[in-house]
């Protein structure tokens, strides 16, 4: 029985190894925050964001994708176009760690096993969860740490373009907005034991953050059979 199981497993993995191609790589770029504190520009990276990517290409048109990105989010009222925010002069600097998973869809076929340079725009979406520290604003905008952290669930909406630049290497550029189901990332709404503290801004508007940058991935795996997709 043991040998039979080993045989079946070897057959299974031999088949899947001929029907999959993978990508592993990095993301490097910038981040910016859109919420109740700081500027409200949609694409205005002001701090660094770095991450890791893993893709499983299931056809020339779509891939399953997982990413882990670490970013520093900064919001400063003084950089806003809103005179009320400038007068308030609040600011924050907080770290964020995001895990995201979903599907990447290319506009045109992107078959890496055919010759020549290929390029295509793509869309990516799925679900994300981001860990951030909790804090709120005391008198005169002084930040009061809660010494806790929370997970903000969200929906990534990414638009990019990518091209193979060398054997096994793919370079991409993307802009990805994350709509979250949280209003706590910028400290405008206290969390946990501090819920009775005063909130600021529009409590009916959740937080956004945006990653803008480049991806570089390395491809590996056997030539796939896409006949079933």
Image (tube, grey):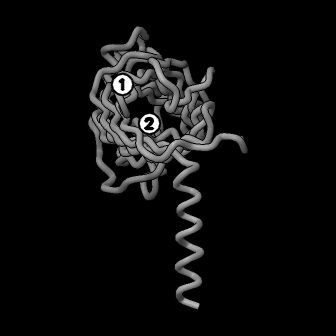
Q: Would residue 138 be seen by someone viewing this image from the given angle?
A: no
Query: x and y percent of residue 158 in the render?
Result: 53, 27
Whole-number angstrom distance, CA of label 2 to CA of label 1: 31 Å
- Could you say whether the residue bearing mark 2 is in a helix, strand or loop? loop
Residue 154 sits in which quadrant?
Answer: top right
Q: Quadrant of the N terminus?
A: bottom right
Toward the viewer: 4 or 142? 4
Q: Is residue 51 above or below residue 17?
A: above
Furthest residue to the right?
228
Query: Is residue 225 or residue 78 the one in the foreground?
Result: 225
Q: Is residue 179 left or right of residue 163?
A: right
Looking at the rendered image, the disc whose residue lies closer to the viewer, 2 or 1, is 1
Q: Residue at x 29, y 48 (%)?
A: 145
Residue that mark 2 sits on: 188
| Residue lying farthest to the bottom in this orientation | 1
Q: Which mark is residue 214?
A: 1
Confirm or deny contact between disc 2 and disc 1 (CB under 8 A).
Answer: no
- Quadrant containing the C terminus in the rendered view: top right
């Amino acid at each position: 029985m043991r040998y039979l199981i080993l045989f079946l497993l070897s057959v299974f993995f031999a088949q899947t190894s001929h029907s999959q191609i993978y990508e592993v790589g990095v993301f490097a770029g910038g981040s910016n925050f859109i919420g109740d504190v700081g500027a409200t520009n949609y694409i205005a990276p002001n701090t660094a964001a770095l991450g890791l990517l893993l893709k499983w290409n299931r056809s020339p048109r779509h891939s399953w994708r997982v990413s882990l990105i670490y970013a520093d989010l900064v919001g400063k009222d003084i950089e806003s176009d809103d005179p009320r925010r400038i007068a308030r002069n609040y600011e924050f600097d907080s770290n964020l760690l995001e895990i995201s998973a979903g599907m990447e869809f290319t506009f045109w076929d992107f078959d890496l096993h055919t010759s020549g340079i290929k390029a295509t725009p793509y869309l990516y979406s799925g679900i994300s969860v981001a860990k951030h520290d909790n804090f709120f604003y005391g008198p005169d905008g002084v930040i009061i740490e809660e010494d806790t952290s929370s997970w903000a669930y969200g929906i990534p909406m990414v638009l990019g373009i990518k091209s193979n630049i060398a054997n096994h290497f793919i370079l991409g550029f993307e802009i990805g907005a994350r709509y979250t189901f949280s209003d706590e990332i910028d400290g405008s709404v206290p969390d946990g034991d501090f819920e009775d503290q005063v909130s600021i801004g529009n409590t009916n508007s959740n937080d956004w953050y945006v990653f803008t940058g480049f991806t570089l991935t390395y491809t590996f795996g056997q030539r796939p059979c896409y006949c079933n997709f």
